[in-house]
Image (spheres, rainbow, N blue to C red):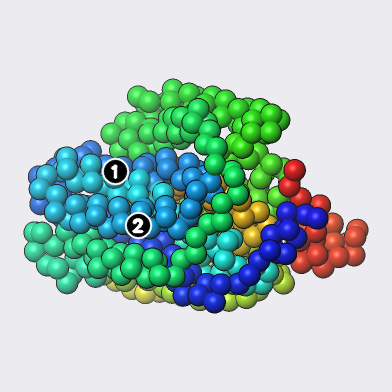
């Protein structure tokens, strides 16, 4: 009997599972929103705390770095111990550190609180996807992952608007503090509901934690991300050698995981996820490449609208709201279609995103400036619909065949790739924007070049998704099977 069949045989649906899902989604939304919501508040933070540009940049990059460092280890701990307990502890920490960010009297203490907040978010994030694996099976799992994917996409897209609204309502020199304080009441409510609704993890005797593997992976991710988060202060030029060191550490980590599997010892991240779980390797690659472009465009739009056109944070957020609305619509429909359409849905979504963002870049380049943001709204909405058909289905197809006992580590690894991609995008795209801008005022030209670079990453994701779709199509034609049969067959779902 396959691992998937064994899990299905012992599955008893929890009547509270859908209410529990919404608790995890609200918590996940907060943690991911905090990656982008702070961007529009950075000028206010810099003025209020008399910080330098390099210091204030760490308010964003420090959170992202700590977030990424924790993901795989946190997922493995959830698999080995109790996902509910780790989720609630991490969520409680996130609330406490959010309050500490809001109350920080200096930039040093704010950065320290943001690092701790990012670490708490990193411990919480992989439990979200693992709890979905634990609570749902079959078609319900696909629907639940659809909601989860929609949460990931919308939280990133809506961040600039949410930040702009908060700053508009909390006017004054200290208004930026409410960007962090807003997490506190929502987080407390989520903790209270989570204690009532979330299921406990059944112990399976898989309690070993590969501490050397934790160190190798952590140092490798740190080495890869640190030059990126330091890009604004010349990190690429000074710290390029860390990319080589990080790659070597990741290779050493992968070799150690294979040796542990060969010895029959539980690894931190089972390499069989990439070789035997249908769709996992491709899905992780698509997610990483897509987030290179997806995460960086919001910073570029904020720079263009606020610095180039003189928009307020709120008006800048409103200008990109069509993308967030489209993403919500696309994700809602994609969650119902992914089981029938499969990888073709991702291919179509990526095509729509490329057309939407490419069209937006051209309209903002050539249309009259006073009407350009509104003329671009329909094609930006199209890009958002496409994004909703990328993030949500890709997460579903990547994780739905992962065995429950590996769900936390699998979700952590998937999100680590996305965070690395996001770090590349948020460092490279604004850097290109400023490089083209130079000493001139050609904000339109800078926008086109930066968005063009984002589309390169998305085109690479499209090529990978198309390859996987065509491979599935050939497999179905040769075996005469429907997409669901191929995706859930013993060959694709087997585990050693």
Quadrant location, the C terminus = top right
How crowded is the residue under tag 1: few (<14 C-alpha within 10 Å), some, or many (20+)? many
Give me the residue at 66% from left, 54% from top: 403
Image side of residue 276 versus residue 373, left or right:
right
Element type at mark 2: helix
The image position of residue 353, as x and y in percent, is: 54, 63
The image position of residue 223, as x and y in percent, is: 43, 30
Task: Name the residue that disc number 1 marks.
Answer: 115
Which mark sits nearer the N-terminus, 1 or 2?
A: 2
Give me the residue at 23% from left, 46% from top: 113
| In-front residue for pair 219/436 | 219
The circle drawn on residue 280 is: none
The span from disc 1 to disc 2 (Cα, nearest Å) is 15 Å
Q: Is residue 334 visible?
A: no
Q: Is residue 318 visible?
A: yes
Task: Name the residue that disc number 2 marks.
Answer: 91
């Amino acid at each position: 009997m396959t691992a998937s069949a064994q899990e299905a045989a012992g599955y008893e649906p929890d009547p509270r599972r859908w209410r529990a899902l919404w608790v995890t989604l609200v918590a996940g939304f907060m943690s991911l929103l905090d990656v982008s919501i702070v961007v529009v508040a950075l000028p206010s933070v810099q003025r209020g705390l008399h910080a330098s540009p390099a210091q204030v940049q760490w308010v964003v990059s420090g959170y992202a770095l700590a977030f990424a460092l924790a993901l795989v280890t946190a997922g493995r701990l959830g698999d080995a111990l109790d996902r509910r307990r780790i989720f609630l502890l991490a969520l409680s920490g996130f609330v406490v550190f959010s309050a500490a960010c809001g109350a920080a009297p200096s930039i040093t203490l704010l950065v320290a609180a943001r690092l701790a907040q990012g670490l708490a978010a990193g411990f919480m994030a992989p439990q979200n996807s693992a709890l979905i694996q634990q609570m749902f099976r079959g078609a319900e799992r696909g629907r639940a992952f659809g909601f989860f994917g929609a949460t990931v996409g919308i939280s990133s897209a809506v961040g600039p608007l949410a930040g702009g609204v908060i700053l508009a309502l909390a006017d004054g020199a200290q208004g930026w503090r409410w960007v962090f304080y807003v997490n506190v009441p929502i987080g407390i409510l989520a903790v209270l509901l989570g204690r009532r609704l979330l299921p406990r993890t059944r112990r399976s005797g898989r309690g070993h934690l590969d501490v050397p593997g934790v160190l190798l992976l952590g140092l490798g991710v740190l080495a890869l991300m640190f030059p990126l988060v330091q890009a604004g202060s010349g990190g690429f030029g000074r710290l390029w050698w860390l990319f080589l060191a990080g790659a070597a550490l990741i290779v050493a980590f992968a070799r150690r995981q294979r040796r542990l599997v060969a010895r029959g010892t539980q690894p931190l991240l089972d390499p069989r996820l990439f070789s035997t779980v249908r769709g996992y390797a491709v899905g992780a690659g698509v997610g990483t490449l897509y987030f290179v472009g997806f995460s960086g465009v919001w910073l570029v739009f904020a720079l263009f609208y606020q610095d180039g056109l003189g928009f307020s944070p709120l008006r800048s957020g409103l200008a990109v709201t069509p993308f967030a609305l489209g993403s919500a619509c696309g994700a809602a429909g994609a969650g119902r279609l992914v089981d029938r359409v499969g990888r073709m849905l991702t291919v179509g979504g990526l095509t729509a995103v490329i057309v939407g963002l490419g069209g937006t870049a051209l309209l903002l380049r050539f249309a009259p400036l006073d009407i350009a943001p509104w003329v671009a709204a329909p094609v930006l909405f199209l890009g958002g619909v496409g994004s909703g058909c990328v993030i949500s289905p890709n997460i579903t197809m990547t994780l739905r065949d992962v065995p429950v006992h590996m769900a936390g580590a699998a979700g952590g690894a998937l999100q680590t790739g996305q965070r690395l991609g996001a770090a590349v995008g948020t460092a490279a795209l604004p850097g290109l924007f400023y490089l083209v801008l130079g000493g001139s005022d050609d904000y339109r030209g800078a926008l086109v070049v930066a968005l063009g670079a984002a589309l390169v990453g998305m085109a690479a994701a499209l090529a990978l998704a198309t390859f996987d779709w065509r491979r599935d199509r050939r497999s179905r034609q040769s075996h005469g099977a429907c997409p669901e049969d191929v995706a859930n067959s013993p060959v694709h779902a087997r585990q050693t």
